[in-house]
């Protein structure tokens, strides 16, 4: 094989491998829910319904929070109810560091997005397919929370 043709073949193999790798994902669910009027009440539970196509197995959760610069606290405590578990898990998120700088990606318009790993769970046929997220902060209403997200990946 000529060096020029060999280079073309190697390049074609690399491109094919990159295409296959980029199309392979372990994410089975990724969705955000808006919070009404950017005020999350303690009694407002956010519900995420898993797709019917989810298979039996172990899954990892990732919790996403979108908020504005007006969020008054450094952290956020959540209660997360998952399929196959008898009680909710508690998730503690640090949205800002000790100096008050946001630990999230921000925009020029004052909106921020933060994502952290959450609890894992075993899903099996017959489990409840609804995941519930609520805040368990002391205040009844949390201002400046705009969206809550959930990403589920296969372990």
Image (tube, grey):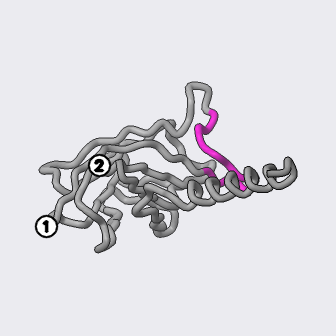
Number of residues whose C-alpha sits closer than 10 Å to that of mark 2, classed few (under 14), some (14–19) or many (20 or more): some
Q: Secondary structure at mark 2?
A: strand
On the question of residue 70 being in view, the answer is: yes
Viewer-side residue, 15 vs 128: 15
**Residue 71: x, y in percent?**
55, 47
Viewer-side residue, 80 vs 75: 80
What's the magenta bit mostly, secondary-structure-wise? Answer: loop
**Residue found at the far top of this picture:** 98
- Compare marks 1 and 2 and give the one earlier in the sequence: 2
Residue named by callout 1? 126
- Residue 125: image quadrant is bottom left
- Horizontally, residue 54 falls left or right of residue 84, namely right
**Residue 42: x, y in percent?**
33, 56
Magenta residue check for 14: no
In the depicted structure, whether residue 129 falls above or below residue 122:
below
- Horizontally, residue 135 falls left or right of residue 142, namely left
Residue named by callout 2? 79
Viewer-side residue, 136 vs 5: 5
Number of residues whose C-alpha sits closer than 10 Å to that of mark 1, classed few (under 14), some (14–19) or many (20 or more): few
Looking at the rendering, the stretch of residues picked out in magenta corresponds to 101-112
**Residue 23: x, y in percent?**
56, 61
The residue at the point 61 percent across, 26 percent down is 99
**Residue 109: x, y in percent?**
73, 56
The residue at the point 42 percent across, 57 percent down is 150
């Amino acid at each position: 094989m000529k060096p020029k043709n060999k280079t073309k073949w190697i390049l074609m193999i690399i491109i094919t491998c990159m295409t296959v790798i980029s199309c392979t994902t372990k994410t089975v669910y990724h969705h955000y829910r808006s919070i009404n009027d950017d005020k999350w009440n303690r009694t407002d539970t956010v519900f995420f319904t898993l797709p019917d196509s989810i298979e039996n197995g172990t899954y990892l959760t990732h919790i996403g929070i979108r908020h504005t610069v007006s969020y008054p606290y450094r952290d956020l405590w959540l209660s997360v109810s998952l399929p196959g578990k008898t009680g909710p898990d508690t998730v503690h998120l640090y949205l800002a560091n000790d100096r008050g700088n946001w630990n999230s990606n921000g925009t020029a318009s004052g909106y921020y997005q933060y994502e952290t790993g959450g609890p894992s769970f075993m899903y099996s046929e017959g489990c409840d397919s609804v995941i519930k997220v609520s805040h368990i902060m002391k205040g009844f209403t949390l201002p400046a929370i705009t969206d809550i997200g959930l990403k589920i990946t296969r372990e």
